[in-house]
Amino acid sequence: QKEVEQDPGPLSVPEGAIVSLNCTYSNSAFQYFMWYRQYSRKGPELLMYTYSSGNKEDGRFTAQVDKSSKYISLFIRDSQPSDSATYLCAIFGNQFYFGTGTSLTVIP
Amino acid sequence: GAVVSQHPSWVICKSGTSVKIECRSLDFQATTMFWYRQFPKQSLMLMATSNEGSKATYEQGVEKDKFLINHASLTLSTLTVTSAHPEDSSFYICSASGTAIYNEQFFGPGTRLTVL
């Protein structure tokens, strides 16, 4: 079993839609959870990080962690074409583990 | 957030030559740096992890003698692709992690290597 599993998509939504991106992880000891956004031919940029279970909101982005289910989510409200990118979840326990990334396209 | 730079951003070289890629943390001390490789439309593949002043730890299947990593200071790590071949053409991305509470990784913008 992989440490982190992420649906690769691709995901295509109309502008203004709510997007839900998800990852599952295997080790309940993992503590830090991150979401990165990567535009084509660019390095990933950190979007959000969370430490505990619950929600963390930043503008149109909400990161959610459910440690009991070992499930993390990133919600994007009012999605924009500029949100079109690949989104990677990352988890830090004793080392970093990255999901394979979900490709998102927001159609104007 | 912290800034990580990479140089060069794009390099084209002939087969058999060596290429050095620099990764710098500009506004923080990076105790650990990571080197990744990414093929088109694929996720990041960790190549190696390096801690300042010590030898890099390579992932399984990564040739140590081909991909030389040096992490001589808390702000600089280099990756040298020795005797590059066309199959080494890829997008190479470094990241750096400091002693921040959340143990975040900050990524550089990547270096696109094309070996002719």
Image: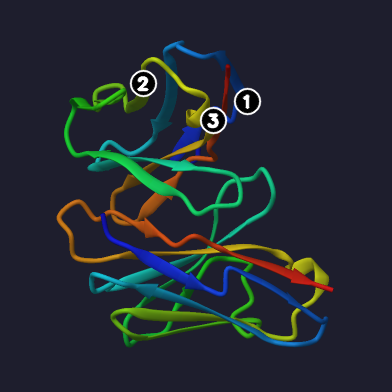
Nearer to the camera, B38 or A37: A37
Marks 2 and 3, Cα distance to the nearest angstrom? 14 Å
Label 3 vs 1, first from the N-terminus? 1
Instruction: Characterize the local packing of mark 2: few (<14), some (14-19) or many (20 or more) Cα atoms within 10 angstroms.
Output: some
Q: Which of the 4 image quarters holds residue A26? A: top left
Q: Which label belongs to residue A84?
A: 3
Circles 3 and 1 in contact, beta carbons < 8 Å = no
Are the residues flagged by discs 1 and 2 from a single subunit? yes
Question: Residue A75 at what x, y percent from top left?
Answer: 36, 21
Q: How is the image coloured?
A: rainbow
Circle 2 — which element?
A: strand
Q: Quadrant of the N terminus of chain B?
A: bottom left
Give the vertical position of A55 relative to A16 (above or below).
Answer: below
Instruction: Characterize the local packing of mark 1: few (<14), some (14-19) or many (20 or more) Cα atoms within 10 angstroms.
Output: few
Instruction: Give the residue displayed 42% in from the left and 12% down from the top.
Output: A18
Give the vertical position of A79 relative to B82 (above or below).
Answer: above
Instruction: Give the residue displayed 75% in from the left and 87% down from the top.
Output: B17
Label 1 vs 2, first from the N-terminus? 1
Q: Which residue is mark 1?
A: A10
Q: Quadrant of the C terminus of chain B?
A: bottom right
Amino acid type for the residue under numbered disc 3: Ser
Amino acid type for the residue under numbered disc 1: Pro
